[in-house]
Amino acid sequence: MIDFGSTPPLEPFNPPNTEHLANYRRIYASSEKRAGRDGITSKEALDDYFAMYDRVGAEHVIIKARDIETTFGLKIRNEDVAEFCQENGPRFKGFAGVDPHKGMDAIRELEFAVRELGLIGLNIQGFENKLPINDKKLYPLYAKCIELDIPVNIHTSINFSTQTLMAHGHPQLLDEVMVDFPELRVIAAPPGFPWVQELIGVAWRHANVHIGLVAVRPKYLGVAHSGYEPLLQYGNTILQDKIIFGSAWPMQPVEQAIDDINALAIKDSVREKWLGLNAARMLRLD
C-alpha cells in the first residue's frame, strides 16, 4: 500500500498561521476527529502515526512540502520534509514545495530539493498560490519537472478556502498544460469535484495524467448522486492504471479509507492498482 498524501503530527508540518484554511476545519471536522487530529503534535500522536502505517502495511507514504509565503505567509520547508524522510527510513518519501511567485529562486530551490535533498516530486497547490493551473508563472516549474524527471502533484478540485478562488483548480485548465508539456508526469488531486467528468476526460486524453483519490472518502464513489460515481466506472475500466490512493491524513482516517476501497465494487486486480501498484509505477518506487 502507498499513501499519496499524509501530514506527520509534528510542528514543522502543522504551522499555526493557517487562517486561510479555517473553513477546511469546519468541512472536515467530523472526519478529522475520527482520525485523531486532537493533540496532533504530541509525542503520543507521532507514535500512533507510525503504528497506524505499520498496521496497514504501508510500503511508502508521501509527505509534501508547501511554499505559499507570497500569498499567505506560510512555508512547510523542503529541508524539514527531507529530514523527516531520512530519519524515518525508506517508507517516507518527500515532494518539494516552492513558491512560483519567487521566479528563478523557486526554480533553484526545486533543483536543490531534488538533487541535494533527495525529494522525488513537486507539490503545487494553485489555490493557495492564487494561481490557476495554467498560469504562465507555473510554466518554468513544469519545464523544470521534465528536466529533473520528477512528477508534479497539482490541486484539481474545489477548495474550501474562502480567501481564494475555487476556479483556480478547474481540471480543464490542466488540459492546456498537458498540450504544452506532454512529457510532464502529473498526479491530479483531489479528484476533480465538482468537475469529476472533466478530470476524467483530461486523464483519458493524456497518457501522463493520473488521478489522485485524495482528501475524499472513497465510499462516496459508490454513492448515487454523490458526483464521484464516474470515477468508479472509469477507474474500474479504462482508467484503472491511473487512480492513486491518498488519505490526506489527518483529514480522514487511513484505515477507514482503505476499508472503503476494499468495499467498493471493483475488481481485485484494480483494487491492488489503486492502493499501490499505480503509485509505485508512476512515482518510480517499484
Image (tube, rainbow, N blue to C red):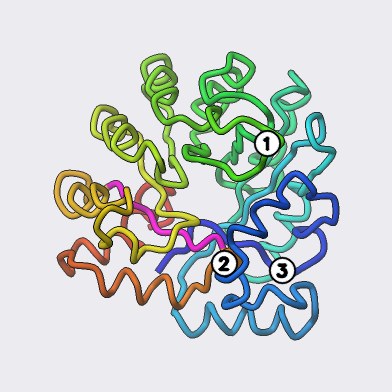
Which label number is shown at residue 87? Answer: 3
**How far apart are labels 1 and 3 at the CA level?**
29 Å
Query: Element under label 1?
Result: helix
Residue 128's label in the rendered image is: 1
Residue 246 lies in the magenta stretch: yes
Residue type, label 3? Glu
Question: Is mark 2 in CB contact (under 8 Å) with mark 3?
Answer: no
Q: Is residue 135 left or right of residue 257?
A: right
Q: Amino acid at mark 2?
A: Pro
Image mark count: 3
What is the quadrant of residue 188 in the picture?
A: top left
Which quadrant, please, contains the N terminus?
bottom left
Q: Nearer the viewer, residue 246 or 264?
A: 264
Q: Pointer 2: what residue? A: 90
Q: As drawn, which residue projects farthest toward the front? A: 225
**Residue at 31% of width from left, 30% of height from top?**
202
Percent x, y for residue 125? 61, 38
